Amino acid sequence: MTDRRNTDRRSQAWFGAQGRSGMLYRSWMRNQGFGHEVFDGRPVIGIATSASELAPCNAHLTRVAEAVKRGVWQAGGLPLQFPTMATGETLMRPTAMLYRNLMAMEVEELIRANPLDGVVLLSGCDKTTPAMLMGAASVDLPAVMVTGGPMLNGKYRGQEVGSGTHVWKFEEDLKTGRMTEEECFFAEGCMARSNGHCMTMGTASTMACVAEALGMQLPGSAAWPAVDSRRMETAQAAGRRVVDMVEEELRPSRILTREAFENAIRVNAAIGGSTNAVIHLTALAGRVGVELGPDDFDALVREVPTLVNLMPSGTYLMEDFCYAGGLPAVMAELLGGGLLHGGPITVTGRTVAENTAPAERVGSDVITPLDAPFQPAGTGIAVLRGNLCPDGAVIKQSAASPHLLTHRGPARVFDSPEAYHAVADDPDLDVDENTVVVIRNAGPKGYPGMPEVSNVPLPAKLLKAGITDMVRVCDGRMSGTGYGTVVLHVTPEAAVGGPLALVRDGDPVVLDVPGRTLRLDVDDAELARRREEWTPPAERYVSGYTWLYTQHVEQADRGADFGFLRGGRGHEVPRDSH
């Protein structure tokens, strides 16, 4: 084993200190049973784990951390595990997105405040991955992401069941009488039958793949199921690798370049990934000084076909994706077609092209070839502009109904998601298949936290009439496991006076996805008159974190980060008080 000792390491400002300070740092660490020899200048590696039983997708990460520790010890480092908060979308109210920035702050400050030379980031549910990447990027110490892996495929009465995606499907079946309450209750256990995050190409799987595409996760590691032994092998390998990264001074700032972000955007299109990647990648780019905006997500994907046939856009699930070759096989296809940059460096110390060279695509159903794609180029995320969304809105074309991508219909306006749900089952609700459901005050400031409420279920009367989709427009987000013709992230949001606040029942809404426009067919003079009448909503929060959030959160086109967190702050520690 290589001698890793170095008295100039960052951690030696603590463990190599002389006199009282050094004695304090070392002696209190030794109450855990560490011998004096571990403070000899070897790399100290933090293992940041978001394990929590309140975040079911992350509950198993304690075991993953043990595998990382083995790797760090093998490579001659000192592993020290520490907990972070866990932003699990499944339980947190009003939304985990409200707390993504708080988690990013916590991760950043914990890394900076402690005697660490590098860090392994253990995440699972969808907000934990971007939060950890954002925090680590702002500190800029060597870091490797290890995501916890997807659940095993769901199985229900002979069919493949996808977490999240089938929640929406079963809800529709329940409303139309095709399923009973007892059957739904039984199906719950069939949907979530192992540790891990959603096994559809929802936001958790998307962000795991995005982390790998960015170069921050070991090749192939995004797709191994949470309970597969190779998930633990990957974690152990990450522990070994981060020790080398400390020696090489391979920091996030060297990996998270403009080209890396362009690769991630194109990979997201090829995998049929979540619209939430737009928000998270934009926020992460802001931490490293890379200019990234909504139009990049439109321009960069127009030539990229959807290659991965996974729910919610397709048929298969993450376990199938893993066995078909995982993300390296997708990236190899894109590289072969000249759609990726091969030169960016990754956590392996090798380039994207070098990492993907041995990749193999198994079969042609789950990961389709570039010359016979699952969906043609131009079916990825589209960014819309117009008088209803001057700073942008997004729609996931691969999950939408083609016949609704060009549509004109009257608005039916709801001032909150709750207002819609209160009447959605009313048989006399004044809607038909041409209606455009508008839900507002669900943005970053308005809700607050920009929850995943945009893909509201269709009114019961339409479902019973056989209508399976309709246009919905909202300033909130949609679960990556969701589907439908839903316009999301309308910016500026209604709560800050965006045009969505001015829409009234019956106003014609015109959606033209091929033309990249979303507009309200109401003349400018009338909109100006309505604006004069509009008054901002009263401030609901006067203290605490939610007050901080509503005062400082930026709009969706800026990643819904806090303005004061943009840019990096490095790893310098506060003055020693001992």
Image (spheres, grey):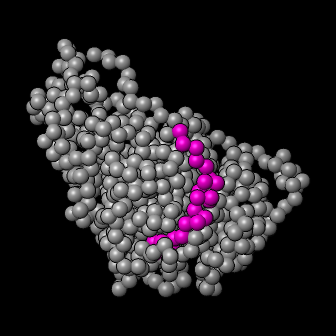
Q: With 517 as the anchor, is 381 left or right in this view?
A: left
Give me the residue at 57% from left, 37% from top.
Answer: 563
Q: Is residue 237 above or below residue 568?
A: below
Q: With 224 as the anchor, is 106 left or right in this view?
A: right
| Nearer-the-camera pick, 127 or 188 | 127
Quadrant containing the C terminus is top left
Q: Place residue 304 in its image quadrant.
A: bottom right
Q: Is residue 385 magenta?
A: no
Q: Place residue 402 in its image quadrant.
A: bottom right
* Prevailing secondary structure class for the magenta stretch in the rendered image: loop
Give me the residue at 22% from left, 24% from top.
Answer: 7
Give me the residue at 73% from left, 73% from top.
Answer: 407
Give me the residue at 30% from left, 45% from top.
Answer: 120
Q: Is residue 8 above or below residue 393?
A: above
Q: Is residue 324 above or below residue 332?
A: below
* Stretch of the chain drawn in magenta: 289-313
Residue 249 appears at what percent x and percent y? 33, 36
